[in-house]
Image (cartoon, rainbow, N blue to C red):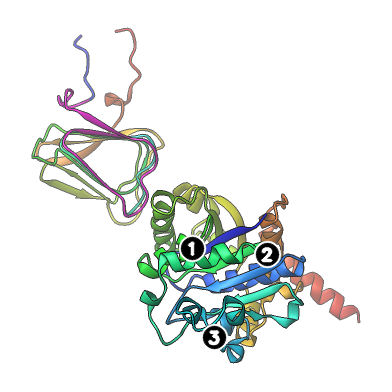
Amino acid sequence: MARQYALGGIVELPTKVVDGTLRSGVSVRFEGNVVVLGDVNPGAEVTAAGNVIVMGVLRGTVQAGAAGDERAVIVAFRLRPVQLRIADHISRSPDGEVFNPNQPEMARVRDGTVVIETFPPGGERQGKN
Amino acid sequence: MSEVIVVTSGKGGVGKTTVTANIGAGLAMLGHKVVLIDADTGLRNLDVVLGMENRIVFDLTDVIEGKCRLRQAMIKDRRFGESLFMLPTAQTKDKSAVTEDDLRNICGQLREHFDYVIIDCPAGIEQGFQSAVAGAEKAIVVTAAEVAAVRDADRVVGILESKADIRDPKLIINRLRIEMVQRGDMMTLEDMHDILGLELLGVIPDDEAVVVATNRGEPVVVNEQTVAGRAFRDIVRRIQGEAVPLMNLESREGFFNRLRKIIGFR
């Protein structure tokens, strides 16, 4: 059985590591991947040409694949964004009650829309296959 | 050892001036020498909240322009002996009248003579804010339990940490309505902590006594019979370095019932 890859294929871009929480009003832009070692608070924004990985709670606005790459993904320990953008697809959190699972999730483009999946993919632990 | 503390919030109307006045008065009641600086040039309020409006002759901008000495612009609050002073700012000028260097310089002079220099910061993050935080080494961020106030507080904390180099600001949550929190209609302390991640200096329950006291020009901290007054006393002791547990907010009704009982027995 073939190994399942988490990312959509962008694995070799340069990566910027943000060492801490991004507070409201802060903007991070990078021509590659961005990894945040903290939360992205409401009012903060991250824009990356590649993937965005948040090792904390994502509550702000994130754009991945900013140069148009639809393979880009957004991964967060807790995905609670105001808005997610991947390439030129924009999605916002639904109005009203939202189901917020307490586990890492990943947003990616599938069939022209942004979908959110559990992370790691499949929601299963990797066994020894 | 003296401390220069700025009281700030980002958003307006969450209670910066009330907090400044009460912390100042509370520290003075414990015998510390305190000076409060109103940095909200053009929209000054601290003098009104302290009931000292009619005693202003010179202000901060006069000191900066060399029209008077620093000592002459400072007004003593006689209710607190020799402990509490206030340095008002001008009402008829704008924020450009006070620069970052001006406040840095004045705070530097004042800290020689006082235990606590407390700056009442204007709302916003523009020049008035920049000047107000320039002279400070510590910060107290005031917020209300609302999404907008917390968002602005978060912004301000980011600027304090990155530009003003003020580490670990402390948080005061003002005007909390515990019955609304319990109903799920107001942000909880946990919600706010999740976003701001600051050490909590205290929680001030919503209390009509604050409005009454403010209109009278008398800090509510003086009155131990009020919930807000006791919350401020706890905060002041924490500023002094004491470890004071958070007051049990739910016991508020119990307190009033007790009070009623006492009155009823008479």
Disc 3 chain ID: B
Secondary structure character of the magenta stretch overall: loop
Disc 2 chain ID: B
Residue B176 visible, this angle: no
- Separation of residues labelled 1 and 2 (CA atoms): 31 Å
Q: Position of residue A65 (x, y in %)?
A: 14, 38
In the image shown, does A117 or A65 lie closer to the viewer? A65
Q: Which mark is residue B104?
A: 1
- Separation of residues labelled 2 and 3 (CA atoms): 33 Å
> How many residues crowd around disc 3 within 10 Å: few (fewer than 14), some, or many (20 or more)?
many
| Three-letter amino acid code of the residue under disc 3 | Phe
Please, is residue A80 above or below residue B256 in the view?
Answer: above
In the image shown, does B94 or B70 lie closer to the viewer? B70
At horizontal 77% and vertical 65% (from top left) the residue drawn is B30
Q: Position of residue B234 (x, y in %)?
A: 70, 60
Numbered range of the magenta stretch: A7-35
Determine which residue is flagged by label 3: B58
Q: Position of residue A3 (x, y in %)?
A: 22, 13
